[in-house]
Amino acid sequence: MALPKAKTDATEARLASLRLPEGAAWASAAREAALGRVRAMGLPERRDEYWKFTRPDTLVQAEVPKAATFEADEAPMYEGIDRLQIVFVDGKFDAEASDDLSLEGVSIERLSDAAEKDIHWAKEVYGVLEERGQTPVDRPLAALNTAMAEDGLLIHVTGKASKPLNLIYHHKSETSDAILHHVVKLDEGAELTVLENGPAAARFNQVIEVDVADGAGFHHVRTQGRDHERRAATHIFARMGKESTFKTFTLTVNGVLTRNECVVEMLGDDAAAHIAGACVGDGDFVHDDTVFVTHDAVNCESRQVFKKVLRNGAKGVFQGKILVKPGAQKTDGYQISQSLLLDDDSEFDAKPELEIYADDVACSHGSTSGAIDEEGLFYLRARGVPREIATDLLTLAFLAEAVQEIEDETLREELVGRLDAWLQRRRG
Amino acid sequence: MLEIKNLHVGLEDEDKQILKGVDLKVGAGEVHAIMGPNGSGKSTLSYVLSGRDGYDVTEGSATLLGEELLDMDPEERAAAGLFLAFQYPVEIPGVGNMTFMRTALNAQRKARGEEEMSAADFLKLVREKAKTLKIDADMLKRPVNVGFSGGEKKRNEVLQMAVLEPKMCILDETDSGLDVDAMKLVSDGVNALRDQGRSFLVITHYQRLLNHIKPDVVHIMSNGRIIKTGGPELALEVEENGYADMRGEVA
């Protein structure tokens, strides 16, 4: 079916502002196929059902909306953790600021280098998981990413990584338009933790494809912090084998627009996927978590836990789906999205969905939206805690429940500490 | 210490007067008890004094050490030395008991222009106070009142009282939901805090709590007023004859 002209025009306008990178045959084939997908789907516009609550205009338009750079005046994250640091500035790999890309049990290459090689393992993953994730819902910004990304990392994990990878994204140009594509392939039984932090760019389009083989484990903790004007559309596509684990957590504070999509396909039995996030929005802020989990194997467990604190007109969106395919018996699916609205101006839109084609499953979902607990607030104040501090304590407590989804205690404490500091700072 | 004059209070949302001219004076170091039937306005009095929303003071005043309480925010009242032990202590998921108490103590100190207490000093202080109330490390670590039994919640109230060292303590039906042993533990905790400078207002339905926390003065409240004031013997009289007689007397 032909796309409406306006959509085609908008899509072509965006494509005209970009250039298909050159590379070896496998990379070019993947990119051209992705470009074909973009043209067939068209880039998102506000009338699209999947973008009902979040306006995609500024993510799509050819010209990057300016975003003033933000000097974070705080200690770097994850300081207390022995980690391999890899730095990107406005979406470009910064070799000087990065550690050597060598880590026991892991091979790390830049996409731009790998794409020159005639034969590369990434052929089996790059754009492949993204394409799988296009059914049954279109994710054109991800296809655009596959087609146009020049930089990113191809990470092959063959054993248990000796330490986490820390990807650090600096935003230094007011008009940077970054497209970054990472691929992570975990062999059988391999394990890796990826920590991401930083705003990345004025506008950031990111795709991470994660191929988790049987018995492998992938842990991901991301913070999108304090940069007020940046925009981001991110996608994670995960394909999971038997008895594998995939866990991702995102903490977002500020940013005018954030859309984080996570698409998980559980193809092997007895796997576990946890997708969680917390955000704090104040004022000009739209935060959208869009999650799609497909159960296509027996006895898999999936959890989606999202918490949002919104004030001064901030908007939160959650679209979460659990699809249980025929035969995916003993599925245990859980989904909760909750918002804490600190005033009457803020908004939370939730669209929880379950679609189940197996008869022996346990799936539950819930969504709540509420104001601060007045009883708790009074109790704290009656003990001498001023209203603002009491509100922050209750806010932190609300968010901490989502942070609990992170397995590692050090990481949990780091994130709660960060949140606490951010809340305190806002209080002045 | 605490002086309440001609206090009239109604509900904000509906046209209903609850306190209809309460007069009460608690001297420094004194323990007063307020007894009265359900709906007499006892709990309302405690909430109005501590600054809970939803009440409308139409007349009168309440001063603590000469300062008007009714003009202050709840946190200011606490910093001024007022403490309400809740009838139903609130559960606050996600906020650790220790964090809560330390935040409260330091907020009060800051408001009074005092230096904040260090984490180490605070830990020492709490451990010492917790021990006498038989509050274990686990209760200190857990979120405020979450999963606490009725007795544990009340002990936790007394622990906060011991840590915050208020000048004027109001105990709102602290005996409700307590078994005999717990009542003794809580009462011992309260008695340990009695001294020349600290006053108590103990609100209760029953005389039994007053066997443990011996009051200097007993007031009987009914229909929004103090209808009778006397010594500890007044509590025994209530236990024998109920409130009906007294209301009859006054009428």
Image (cartoon, coloured by chain):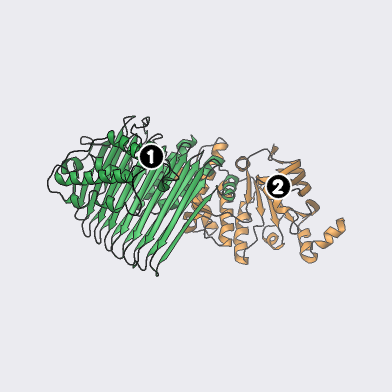
Chain to which the residue tagged by mark 1 belongs? A
Are circles 1 and 2 on residues that touch, CB within 8 Å?
Answer: no
Outermost residue toward the bottom? Answer: A360
Looking at the image, which is closer to me, A11 or B59?
A11
Chain A colour in the picture: green
Is residue A75 among the parts visible in the rendering? no
Gap between marks 1 and 2 measured at Cα: 42 Å
Instruction: Report crowding for label 1: few under 14, some 14 to 19, many 20 or more residues within 10 A (C-alpha).
Output: many
Looking at the image, which is closer to me, B35 or A414?
A414
* Residue A209 x, y percent position in the rendering: 27, 50
| Residue type indicated by callout 2 | Asp
Is residue B77 among the parts visible in the rendering? yes
Secondary structure character of the magenta stretch overall: loop
* Residue A398 x, y percent position in the rendering: 48, 50
In which quadrant of the rendered view does residue A68 lie?
A: top left
Chain to which the residue tagged by mark 2 belongs? B
Please tell me whether mark 1 sits on a helix, a strand or a loop.
loop
Please tell me whether mark 2 sits on a helix, a strand or a loop.
loop
| Residue type indicated by callout 1 | Gly
| Image-based side of B213 in relation to A381, left or right | right
Segment tinted magenta in the rendering: A1-5
* Residue A63 x, y percent position in the rendering: 34, 31
Chain depicted in orange: B
Residue A225, label in figure = 1
Residue where numbered disc 2 is placed: B13
Instruction: Report crowding for label 2: few under 14, some 14 to 19, many 20 or more residues within 10 A (C-alpha).
Output: few
Residue name at image x 70 percent, y 63 percent = B208
In which quadrant of the rendered view does residue A64 lie?
A: top left
Vertical side of A299 occupied by B173: above or below:
above
